[in-house]
Image (cartoon, grey):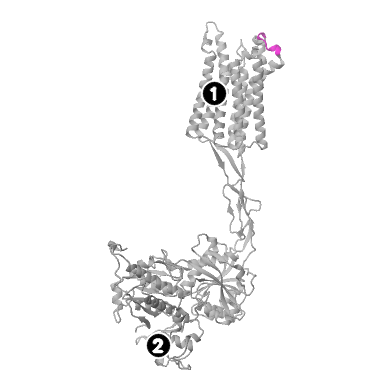
Amino acid sequence: MSLPVLEKKGDIILGGLFSLHDMVVEPYLAFTSPPPPTKCTRFNFRTFRWMQTMIFAIEEINRNGNFLPNITLGYKIYDSCSTPHQALKTAMELMGTEKGSDLEKSLSSGTCHGNVPVVIGDGGSTQSIVVAHFLGVFHVPQVSYFSSCACLSDKKEFPAFLRTMPSDFFQVDALVQLVKHFGWTWVGVIAGDDAYGRGGANIFANKVQKLGVCIAFYEIIPKNGEQTHIASIVSTIRSSEAQVILVFAVEQDAATLFDQALRDGLSGIQWLASEAWSTAAIFSSHRKYHHILQGTMGFAIRGAYISGFQDFLLRLNPSSSDDHEDNFLVTFWEEVFQCRWQAESQEHKSEGKPPCSGKEQLGGKKSIYSDVSELRISYNVYKAVYAVVHALMSMRRCVKGTGPFLQHACPDIDNIKPWQLLHYIKQVQFLNSVDDEIKFDENGDPSAMYDLVNWQLKPNGEMEFVAIGRFDETTDTSNQKLQIKEQNILWNGNQTQVPLSMCSTICPPGTRKAIRPNVPICCHDCVACTAGEISNQTDAIECVQCLPEFWSNAERTACIPKQVEFLSFSDTMGITLMVSSLIGTLSTGVVVFIFFFNRTSPIVRATNSQLSFLLLFSLALCFLCSLTFIGQPSKWSCMLRHTAFGISFVLCISCMLGKTLVVLIAFKATLPGSNIMKWFGPVQQMAIISFCTLAQVMICTVWLAVAPPTPRRMMPRESAVVILLCDEGSRVAFALVLGYIGLLACFCLPLAFLARKLPDNFNEARLIVFSLLIFCAVWIAFIPAYISSPGKYTTATEVFAILASSYGLLGCIFAPKCYIILLRPEKNTRKHLMSKASFGKF
């Protein structure tokens, strides 16, 4: 037996599935005779209005010749009775090829679409899942207006499913942000026992738990409405002490729960409504729910005013010639006016009800059907029809040879293949009559935009859904997706009191929540953030690590720029080293002055005055080069400091090497028959010094050309300072510079040691030995100190080593000479210097 159907002929037939009844009474199966037809009960006025929206849209399009000229749309609409198996029956009926055809043969042939290339519906997610599995096999597009289960976005499982209803994924995201916004951390969750309820509630629970929100309880509303089970849920609500509870269910399941809550006297709960019942007229129109549901908050999909729609709704009358074939109108009429339609057979009569006159007026009867103030799902139906029409328009506009199919073929508008229409529907993008953009993403979902509604009681006792905010999934910034006008919210009749629902106290900024062992995650302690981390909001789940160049303030609420640390001219250490450098330079200048005015004295002439002045010049450079290590590192200072240091010290050591060689060569020259001094005159001495220094210059030049030292910022996570220093660039070149200085010192030291007791001339080799011993000791101690010193102390260690070794060379080599020149002039004679007794005093 065929199912009841409302149809209208046309060139293109659109299928429709609507749950016009809320229940199915299963027939008794005797197994001896064919089963009687399934009986649907509890007529739903709101769904009937949705069905009328589809008819209105189709007739509006047919009247407007601009959409599909010379093409008439028809429809074929079935009642799925809010049950999956009935929805599947209606889908199979829609896919029948012709009346009386063998459906099983059509299914096996793989061409099971008949003259219905697309299906609008179904409403519930559970029904749509069943239908989508069936239609997806044949790639028949299905455009749902009310199925929001996030599971339907899976295109592998539901390849032909699209919808004008946003996915629950976005609704849950909005609910999660709402919970986060008001700081609720102890939330109960109640779900309907279907794909919509369980799917949405599970996503919500998983998301809020990641934010540190605890699920006080998770309950399922049974479909059979067993009172014992429902009473147990209400008892759980009382014992949990949760003040905020989300009910993610269709309105029928929510009504079952609230009926029991009324019986048990439950009140004082802040209810969060899922979209399915957030604007349900079943609650707003019955005053018994008002005192427990006032203040309820929920998200509703965006609605719109549809011009001419109310007049279209009120035109219906079973006695009209246009409506006499409407199989569902009589039932609707009888339910609205509580009468029996006399023209119908006995099965449509209701005992105890007066007969319908046919003159009843829908405009004079207030009902959910005629209320067009909240056209939300109806608007979704309207958009679904227009999305299909725009796809048909695109198919019709296809130019031969430029089509999207094999060999650029275009579809045949007179013989539409469902899979071709599916392709075009996926590409739909247009602005409708109210300037809303209609399009589908890669999952077949529309853009998600919701109104946040608050249930508020009017002075006349009526419930009003007041929009207090909105959620726009298309907003780029996550923090701006949810916008709330808190001044417009009423909490159980009180405008200012926000209900608290938490297990622990609020953790202030600068602290984080620490989980207590063996208790829910929202029952926590507040622990101060560690140094370098902050939390700038209450109830922070974790402290945020500051960026490397920032550090936490004392309150641990903000990241402030780290203090920049380098060896500065203004701090105590920098001033000390700078003064030491200048004193060393000044002392060297004093020695130069003394030597210059006593340049003809025996002691100055005996120590090779030319090399002495060059040595003093190199020592002055050593003292001055230490200044390049002080101050903020720059590109030029980094390159200068290491190269100047390396060249200055090589020049210094080279001069001492020259002095040592002079002593050794002078001794050899006193032997009979020796003429070696002519090969080691002043020119040769300067050549040796120049050659030794030039080698260091070449090393430094290659260093600067290949990998020069550069400024670098060290930002250790565990430190409150940014360390500015010079990176060596090439560690090999840096090692070569130091190694070359050490090599010259190691070569000069044994030579000076051998010459320390040679007679017949003023012997300063002993002074060179002492100075080189100090030099080597300083730089050997420098290596571990340099490696282990932190921050600016690394640079300070290097400066100290430069100054210490420079002072050692200046003091050991020139202090004894200045002592004799200034304080013991009697020893500054050639006779005294040539006497052997004098050697022991140096």
Q: Position of residue 708 (x, y in %)?
A: 51, 34
Region rendered in magenta: 825-831
Q: Is residue 810 visible?
A: yes
Answer with the quarter of the image where residue 585 lies.
top right
Considering the whole magenta stretch, tell me its main secondary structure. helix
| Mark 1 closeness class: few <14, some 14–19, many ≥20 residues within 10 Å | some
The quadrant of the rendering that contains the N terminus is bottom left
Query: Is residue 317 or residue 596 the one in the foreground?
Result: 317
Q: Is residue 129 visible?
A: no
Instruction: Identify the residue at horizontal 70%, vertical 13% (top origin).
Output: 825
- Taking 726 as reference, is 25 above or below it? below
The quadrant of the rendering that contains the C terminus is top right
Tag 1 residue: 744
Pointers 1 and 2 in contact (C-beta within 8 Å): no
Tag 2 residue: 320
Task: Describe residue 516's horizontal placement relative to residue 254 as left or right.
Answer: right
Label 2: element kind: loop
| Mark 2 closeness class: few <14, some 14–19, many ≥20 residues within 10 Å | few
Q: Amino acid at mark 1?
A: Leu
Task: Describe residue 549's horizontal placement relative to residue 449 as left or right.
Answer: right
Q: Position of residue 404 (x, y in %)?
A: 32, 63
Answer with the quarter of the image where residue 211 lies.
bottom right
Q: CA distance from mark 1 to mark 2?
A: 118 Å
Q: Position of residue 385 (x, y in %)?
A: 40, 73
- Count of picture labels: 2
